[in-house]
Amino acid sequence: MIHAILTILATVLYLASGAGLAARLLRRPDSAGLRRACLVAATVAVAAHTVEVWQTTWLGGSLNLSFFNAASLVGWMMSLLLLLLALPRRPVENLGIAILPLTGVAAFLSFYVGRPAAHTAPVADVDIHIFVSVLAYSILGLAAVQALLLAVQERQLRHRRPGHIIGALPPLQTMEEMLFSMLRLGFVLLTLALISGWLFVDNLFAQHLVHKTVLSIVAWLVFGTLLWGRHRFGWRGQTAMRWTLGGFATLMLAYFGSKLVLEFILRR
């Protein structure tokens, strides 16, 4: 009963904090008090969600990463990272407009709709691989949302329609620097995730892992090319946004696409 209550609480607070941040972005003038209230609500949501993640993902010492559980875990990690990044007043809270409501939906579906998946015995090395993979996915997910926000900002500037959204966001150069900081960290973590997979996961190219592995490598190449292009040619703007979104879409297809096919189409 307590887990159901905490899940509902987390879902409601995630949705409320996301809506509050959206209202703050559109509000004139900006409200620092509303920012604090939204971040406090999101913090309570993450705390309540932590219990739900533990309850659904770790059962009796075994790991359950079915489709909705994995989505809930990644959303929880992204929300936690968002709050940690916002602590020193970095202007990243606007990413919560998309991330927090989606995490709330994922938490609700994980608890009430998610079905059991094959459990794996806890192995320290594999747990390290999973943790690094989720961390990499979450950082690159934040970068993808940042790219979308950057696209909105650039589009309004290009069409010379500066509204309150433009005034509420950091300067375009700052937004781009934040994007590439996330991409660099995410790329390093994705590299470590792939290396740890080779080292710790038996038969990485097994039937259920081959698509995930190949697509993850493709995503790694996409992000690596983007960072090289940024360093060598100064890629920015629309080019950076397209490569970021393309790389994350490939990574999302690698993990959630394969799970979707296995669990809901092949029923495995």
Image (cartoon, grey):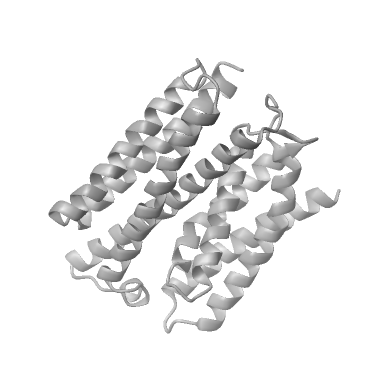
Is the residue 59 above or below the residue 28 in the image? above
Q: Which of 113 and 227 is in front in this view?
A: 227
Residue at the image position 51 percent from the left and 55 percent from the top: 99
Q: Residue 180 at x, y = what percent? A: 31, 58
Q: Nearer the viewer, residue 264 or 124?
A: 124
- Residue 239 placement, left or right of 54: left
Q: Residue 176 at x, y = what percent? A: 28, 63
Residue 59: quadrant of the picture: top right
Residue at the image position 50 percent from the left and 30 percent from the top: 199
Is the residue 243 above or below the residue 24 in the image? above
- Residue 210 placement, left or right of 235: right
Number of callouts in the render? Answer: 0
Residue at the image position 60 percent from the left and 48 percent from the top: 105
Q: Residue 137 at x, y = what percent? A: 47, 45
- Residue 102 placement, left or right of 152: right
Q: Nearer the viewer, residue 236 or 135?
A: 135
